[in-house]
Amino acid sequence: MASIENTPSARIAALAAAQKSYFRQGATLPEAFRRTMLRRLDQALVQWERRLCDALWEDLHKSPEEAILTELSIVRSEVRNHLRHLRKWMRPERRPTPLKLWPSRSRILAEPLGQALIVAPWNYPVQLLLNPLVGAISAGCTAVLKPSPYTPAVARTLEAMIGEIFDQEYVAVVQGNREVNRQLFDLRWDVIFFTGSPDLGRTVMEAAARHLTPVVLELGGKSPCIVDRGADLTVAARRIAWGKTLNAGQTCIAPDYLLLHRSLREPFREAFARALRELHGADARQSPFYVRIVNQKAFERVAGYLTEGRITVGGRTDAAERYIEPTLLEEVDPSAAVLREEIFGPVLPEVLFDETREAIEFVTSREKPLALYYFGPEAAGRDVLLHTSSGGACLNDTIMHIANEEIPFGGVGNSGMGRYHGRESFEAFSHRRAVLCAPARFDLPFRYPPYKGFRWVKKIL
């Protein structure tokens, strides 16, 4: 597989300058223009579906079904949502005006921030590049897109698709490694949207601070999955197994570790093994729906976690195929790397608890995660949510909150800042501008020196 070549520095600078000029001309501002561009993107996803699916198979061994379910359909749903609500979101929002400012009127205008830089990771290389782009388009911004070099077939396909449907002074793709990232972050943007690890997020934020550029950081972390007394173990095991093996665990909101009530240890293990067989057969390596680890370095890192506990389910690997079988680990030391580092693979370490408060304490003693999952009585789950913090959460499910474009997606603390999907995507690339409209024919004298009648005016201030 040929590696991606870095886009030359001169071209990056020229694209940034061209997009700045294009935005200043006001071409992106009309609603009709934004709608046309959103429809163009949606049509391209239909026309390029086969090529994008082929590229995802080449890079990640991702089946067409999973590619459509977790990548293309999510972007298309986002486009449809924006087309449905764009006029309402763009409309000036009335706000009350206090008596002291009568007869003025108050409004909030949503204006585009301007030039957007969108940097995406490799694990969902289509969705996580194009979903933010939907928000940039609907808000009226221009955008430079930077796909991951670790999925080169997808990166090239996306560059070809974007080049076919958009003029480069409006939306353009640049390619390359972290040196290209550094060059991009050295430039001044109006907003940076970055999806990746917390460590890289700190680098992005540090670079953005030099220009006081606002950032949206969609990061990761160790998302806990609590299985409590009262859980339906068949359902819990199936949904956890699905969430953990989706994209071979290379999902920022995958269940990263299992907090399991001690009384459920044996029945959950049996239910989990059974669920894996139902999803991927007796040998997941033969399943057409089981993704491979992205590269050899990642394979070696994830495979190394298998030595940090007792394997009770799975554990087989094949370095030549970058294959790691879905694995359940027991008897893991809380200080082990598999319980400290984001796994990003199909390994699920287990921690036992006797009381729900112990699980809560375990979660709150660590960095705030991007997602939290609870299986058990809903009332108990609501209490867990009350006493914990996470970017998003599911009660008696995993992953699926990301599929609802009507609710925001984003992190908190170490797992990120800012949010998107639906209206939040529009607002992520917009500035909410406060405007006071004062009529010229009324000019109340109380605000001007010598402040006549001030003792009466003071009563309404």
Image (spheres, rainbow, N blue to C red):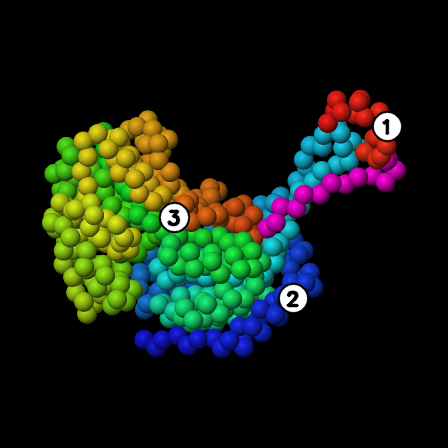
Q: Is residue 400 left or right of residue 11?
A: left
Q: Which residue is mark 2?
A: 22
| Label 3 with label 2: CB-CB less than 8 Å | no
Q: Residue at x 35, y 68 (%)?
A: 150
Q: Nearer the viewer, residue 209 or 51?
A: 209
Q: Residue at x 21, y 64 (%)?
A: 300
Q: Quadrant of residue 375?
A: top left
Disc 1 crowd rating (10 Å Cα; few below 14, some 14-19, many 20+) is: few
Mark-to-mark CA distance, 3 and 1: 54 Å
Judge depth for marks 3 and 2 and give the one in front.
Answer: 3
Q: Which residue is mark 3?
A: 414
Q: Provide the secondary structure element on which disc 2 rests.
A: helix
Q: Earlier in the sequence, mark 3 or mark 1?
A: 3
* Amino acid identity at mark 3: Asn
Q: Which residue is mark 1?
A: 452
Q: Is residue 460 left or right of residue 3?
A: right
Q: Residue at x 37, y 38 (%)?
A: 389
* Amino acid identity at mark 2: Tyr
Q: Residue at x 22, y 53 (%)?
A: 337
Mark-to-mark CA distance, 3 and 2: 36 Å
Q: Nearer the viewer, residue 420 or 75?
A: 420
Q: Position of residue 17 (x, y in %)?
A: 61, 70
* Amino acid identity at mark 1: Lys
